[in-house]
Image: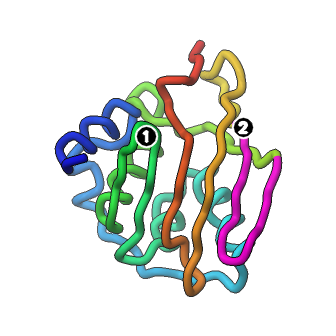
Amino acid sequence: MNKLKAFAVLAGLGFGSPGSAQDMPLPPTRTQETVRAIVNEHIDALNRCDWNRVMAQFPDDVTFMMPNGAISQGRQRIGELFAGFCKSRSEGGFKGAKLIPEATVEVGNTVSVSWRIEADYLAEAYRGADAYLTRDGLLAAQVTTFDPNQMKFR
């Protein structure tokens, strides 16, 4: 999938728009001691929409694989995704959502999490799963089923 098409898919999923994170300097990376700690930090930072904490987890070569074959690579691009995610619902984001792990499986440097998302603006909980691939204390890649087009809003 070419970059323009991949971005169109991401924009359709409710993720950031071009330039949404360009004025936000990326924070230094911050490693975690264990694979489970990496995932716990990611979920807590995401639930708080703490962009700096979320972005401190990713190396420069981070890769996200999303529904419909969309792929996003690099810290700057991932920063744009999360800047969009952490906007208010009225701005097309998901601030205020809570990702709640329901089942977790750890195999080597990978943690898979089945989760649900709850928010005041959802008509019902939304369920999905992520696989977090870690390297050297950072979140090096993520495979996600997150697709806002499948969410039921109030």
Q: What residue type is labelled 2?
A: Arg
Count the marks: 2
- Quarter of image, res 61: bottom left
Q: In this view, does 80 lie to the left or right of 49?
A: left
Q: Residue at x 35, y 67 (%)?
A: 75
Which numbered disc, 1 or 2, marks the residue that appears first in the sequence?
Answer: 1
Q: Identify the residue position indicated by label 2 in the image.
A: 116
Q: Residue at x 31, y 36 (%)?
A: 9
Q: Identify the residue position indicated by label 1 in the image.
A: 87
Residue 47 image offset from top left, x and y in percent: 63, 49
Q: Is the magenta stretch mostly helix, strand or loop?
A: strand
Front residue (pair 106, 148):
106
Q: Is residue 60 left or right of residue 151?
A: left
At mark 2, the secondary structure is strand
At mark 1, the secondary structure is loop
Q: Is residue 105 above or below residue 82?
A: below
Image quarter of the C terminus: top right
Within 10 Å of disc 1 (Cα), the crowding (few <14, some 14-19, many 20+) is: some
Residue 106 image offset from top left, x and y in percent: 77, 67
Q: What residue type is labelled 1?
A: Lys
Residue 151 image offset from top left, x and y in percent: 57, 23
Within 10 Å of disc 2 (Cα), the crowding (few <14, some 14-19, many 20+) is: some
Q: Is residue 11 above or below residue 43?
A: above
Q: How far apart are marks 1 and 2 (CA)?
A: 19 Å
Which residue is outermost to the top? 154
Q: Which mark is residue 152?
A: none
Residue 107 within the magenta-colored segment of the rendering: yes
Q: Is residue 125 above or below residue 51?
A: above
- Marks 1 and 2: which is nearer the front? 2
Residue 16 within the magenta-colored segment of the rendering: no
Give the residues in magenta: 103-116
Q: Which residue is drawn at 58% across and 69% down?
A: 133
